[in-house]
Structures are given as structure tokens and as C-alpha cells.
Amino acid sequence: MNVALFIPCFVNELFPHVAMATVELLEGYGVTVHYPMDQTCCGQPLSNNGDSRGACEAAQRFTGLFKDYDYVVSPSGSCTAYVKHHYDWYIADSNAYKALQPRIYEIVEFLQDVLKVEKLPKPVYFPHTVSIHQSCHGLRELGHAAPSELMVPYHSRLERILQLVDGIEVRLPERRDECCGFGGTFSVDEPEVSVAMGEDRVAQHEATGAQFIVGADPSCLMHMGGIIRHNGRPIRPLHVVEILTGRGGAA
């Protein structure tokens, strides 16, 4: 199958190692990975700040660029959720988008729902304790886990896929699906609230005794990582693909 890699702009600029780990993981399963060089921001910041025209143009551009691939896969739950569930606000009449929409996946979704993986491409040993961070978009728009407010049986995609890693111990913070406070441009508009929420969330992860916070959304990991560095905390954020490819131990 031919998969187009959708790399959000901030991942391209700040976390290229996450993009490379995503490629390594997909190619390990025999997937042919393409990277459309003309991709730009998906338009989520434009939409969140009321620029409907800009958001519409971004949606049209994205659709035109990715429409001919078998699947579109991204290591960002937030950006994937926006493209998959919010573009129809702007280009609902686009037949190209209607055909593309069901082929857009976040990386963990893709591994579990399309490739249906039961083992990693190569054995990975990660003898550390990790605390799972369930990001809001992945949780409530992509179904990465069971939101606690729904009072349904618990499940977690991240927890399930991390079971494929040898030596790892997975823990959950007391409030397992609380927001980290990033919220995209919310962190710019309300920095004091955003930082306070992030500090609380980091403390909850630390209370598990974990050495690493593991998530599937680099934006949340970026936010908590900044707070961790600013406060000199020992716990460290890692994207799940870094662990699944064996890159996490060296980070």
C-alpha cells in the first residue's frame, strides 16, 4: 500500500525525530511511505482563530495534495482529528474530501485498525516505567481511550500497543484523561491558566513513579516538556513511536 505521511508543521520544525520514527515504523511493516513535499499547515490554527477563508483554503489544499494515496497517516492526534472531523465544516461539498476522509489515520489507529499489528517489526526492550497521557482530541474524537465521563468499560489504544514492548511498565495518572492545558492557541491567549493546568498534569504523571510521560500527540508532549524543563523536573515526555521503534532509550 502507498501511504502519505502527514507531518504537522510544528512536528516538522521541532520534532523531526518523531516524523522519522513514524517512517521507520511504517516501513518496518512493509508499507511504502511517501512524503508530499508541498504540504503545509492543515489549517487548525486558522479555524480556531476564526479565519474561515484561510481554513477553507487549507482544507482544499490538503485534499488536493493527499487525495490520490491509499492512506494518509500522521503522528499527531490533534491534527488528524481536525482534518478528519472538521474539514467538512468548510468543504462539505467536496467529493474528493468525502473519498479521502475515511482514509485518514493517526499512526496508532492505523497500526491497530488497518495493519492489525500483533507484534513490532523488531523486538524492542524498554525497561522503564511510563505514564500514559491521553490527549483530548485523541480521546474524544479518535476514540483512543474511553472517556471517564461516559462511565463505559475502560480501554486504551496506547496501553494496548505498549504491551508489545518488552520490559515496559505502564501506569495511569489518577485522573487518567485530564487535559494538559495546551489547547493550541489557548496557551497563547490564556498562558497563566495553560501553565497551571500543565503543572498539575505533570505532577499527576510524576505521582505514578514513572520516568516518562508517553502520548500520541506531540503538541501535548511539547507543552508538558516545556514545563518540565522550566521547572527542572526529571520526568521526560516521549512520543509513543519513539518507544515502538526503540528510539526512546537513547533520548
Image: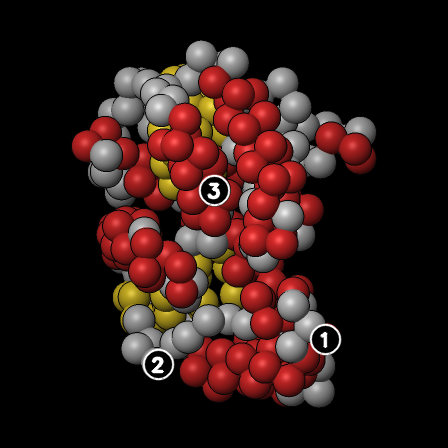
207 w.r.t. 163: above or below: above
Marked residue nearer the N-terminal end (2 or 3): 2
Q: Please give the residue where the numbered disc 1 appears in the rendered image.
A: 89
Q: Please give the residue where the numbered disc 2 appears in the rendered image.
A: 38
Label pair 2/3, CB-CB below 8 angstroms? no
199 and 60: which is toward the camera:
199
Graded by Cα atoms within 10 Å as few (under 14), some (14 to 19) or many (20 or more), the crowding at tag 3 reads: many
Question: Quadrant where the N terminus lies?
Answer: bottom left
Graded by Cα atoms within 10 Å as few (under 14), some (14 to 19) or many (20 or more), the crowding at tag 2 reads: few
Point 47% across, 42% down: residue:
223
Give me the C-alpha separation between circle 1 and circle 2.
23 Å
Q: Please give the residue where the numbered disc 3 appears in the rendered image.
A: 223
Label pair 3/1, CB-CB below 8 angstroms? no
Point out residue 181 in the picture as x, y percentages from the top left corner: 60, 40
Q: Name the residue furthest left.
A: 250
205 sits to left or right of 94: left
Point 30% across, 77% down: residue:
37
Question: Which of labels 2 and 3 is toward the front?
Answer: 3
Q: Which amino acid does label 1 sit on?
A: Trp
Residue 220 visible to an observer of this rendering: yes
Q: What residue type is labelled 2?
A: Asp
Q: Which amino acid does label 3 sit on?
A: His
Residue 101 visible to an observer of this rendering: no
**SS of the residue at dot 3?**
helix
The scheme the figure's colours follow is secondary structure
Point 32% across, 54% down: residue:
14
Marked residue nearer the N-terminal end (3 or 1): 1
